Image (cartoon, rainbow, N blue to C red):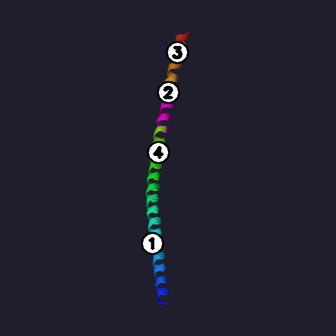
Amino acid sequence: MEIAGQTIIQLVNQAVEAADANVKHALDVAHKLSHELRAAEQRNTDLEADLRYYKDRAERAAVRLAEHSAHREPSLALWLR
């Protein structure tokens, strides 16, 4: 009976060690993914800021182009007569 008890204790200890290793691995993966998620969120924030910047520039350029075209058209029409 003593050998059976020791065998059971060894099996339980092996199961505990395997469970501990699985938990450590899961925590390592979760930690890595957490860092990757934070980096992706920051990249997304940066890209959204870039998008706002370039959208604003494009809108201002369109206004300037329209103003320039409005000033150029009358003189061009006079020149073509």
Circle number at residue 47 = 4
How dense is the environment of label 1, judged by Cα within 10 Å: few (below 14), some, or many (20 and up)?
few
- For mark 1, give the secondary structure: helix
Which disc number belongs to residue 20? 1
Q: Earlier in the sequence, mark 4 or mark 1?
A: 1
- Marks 2/3: CA distance? 16 Å
How crowded pointer 2 is (Cα within 10 Å; few <14, some 14-19, many 20+) is rated as: few
Q: Nearer the viewer, residue 11 or 29?
A: 11
**Circle 3 SS class:** helix
Magenta residues, start to end: 55-65
Circle 3: residue type: Leu
On residue 76, the disc is 3
The secondary element bearing badge 2 is classed as helix
Going from N to C along the chain, the mark reached first, 2 or 1, is 1
> Toward the viewer: 43 or 63?
43
The kind of secondary structure the magenta stretch mainly shows is: helix
Q: Is residue 64 magenta?
A: yes
Q: Quadrant of the C terminus?
A: top right
Name the residue that disc number 2 marks: 65
The amino acid pointed to by label 1 is Asp
The percent position of residue 5, horizontal first and vertical second, equals 48, 87
Relative placement, left or right, of 73 versus 28 is right
**32 to the left or right of 70:** left
Q: Which one is in front, 80 or 31? A: 31
Determine if the magenta segment contains residue 69.
Answer: no
